[in-house]
Amino acid sequence: MDKQAIYDYLKTRNISYEATEHKPVYNMDELADTGLQQADIIAKNIFVRDDKKERYYLITVKGEKRINLKEIRRSNGTRRLALADKYKIRRLLDLVAGSVSPLGLLNDRERRVCLLIDNDFTDAPALIGVHPNDNTATITLRTEDLIRIIKEHGNEVRTTEIEDTRGDNQDEPAADLRT
């Protein structure tokens, strides 16, 4: 689904959302330059795979967080995790780097990608800001609505505690994390 298809999909399901159009952004620093309100609910998305390239995960955390893949592995019982390449993003989610979003799971025909969503998004106000599969807009919707439509699509969704590793001397998965 492209941006307009996402808007139509949400409307047909009576899911309220607010859309903000902006210049194309490819990372959290560029998104900050757009002046979006409620920056504390904006999601950063990291597409990873296990070491056997059998399981794929979209990790969705609050934008300011830095994460440790080893800790996510431990807390979620996965195999070793590494960033998935842009070809898998295209093949599995029909998206390009910079446009990765939990809404991209609606393009996952094989239902191979599990959404690991930071449980901070379930705390009040329980809103999340994500791309509508296009990095020229950000939509804000209720976290429970996002989780529900991804589950209805047939993808696994796990809310999980994802610790912020800012200030730790632990490795970050990559210097160029895409939104």
Image: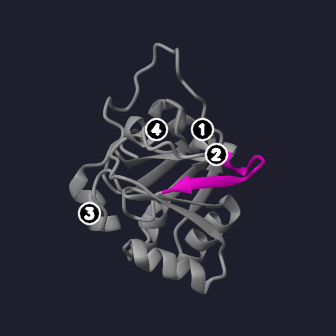
Query: Residue at point 52% right, 14% down?
Result: 167
Horizontal side of 66 relative to 40 (left or right) equals left
Q: Which residues are magenta?
A: 121-130
Three-letter code, disc 1: Ser
Query: Residue at point 72% right, 51% down?
Result: 122
Q: How is the image coloured?
A: one colour
Disc 1 + disc 2, Cβ < 8 Å? yes
> Callout 2: 10 Å neighbours few (<14), some, many (20+)?
some
Horizontal side of 17 relative to 97 (left or right) equals right
Query: Which percent across, then down, holds residue 151?
Result: 59, 71
Considering only order in the chain, which callout, 2 or 1, is on the residue closer to the N terminus?
1
Q: Which residue is mark 3?
A: 90
Three-letter code, disc 4: Ala
Q: Which residue is mark 1?
A: 75
User: In the image, which is nearer the foreground, mark 1 or mark 4?
Assistant: 4
Q: CA distance from mark 2 to mark 3?
A: 26 Å
User: Is disc 4 placed on a helix, strand or loop?
Assistant: helix
Q: CA distance from mark 2 to mark 4?
A: 25 Å
Disc 2 + disc 4, Cβ < 8 Å? no
- Residue 32 is marked as 4
> Callout 4: 10 Å neighbours few (<14), some, many (20+)?
some
Q: Which of the 4 quarters of the picture holds residue 99?
A: bottom left
80 or 139, nearer to the observer: 139
160 or 14, nearer to the observer: 14
Q: Which of the 4 quarters of the picture holds residue 69?
A: top left
Query: Which percent across, then down, holds residue 10?
Result: 57, 77
Q: Is residue 128 magenta?
A: yes
Three-letter code, disc 2: Thr
- Residue 160 is marked as 2
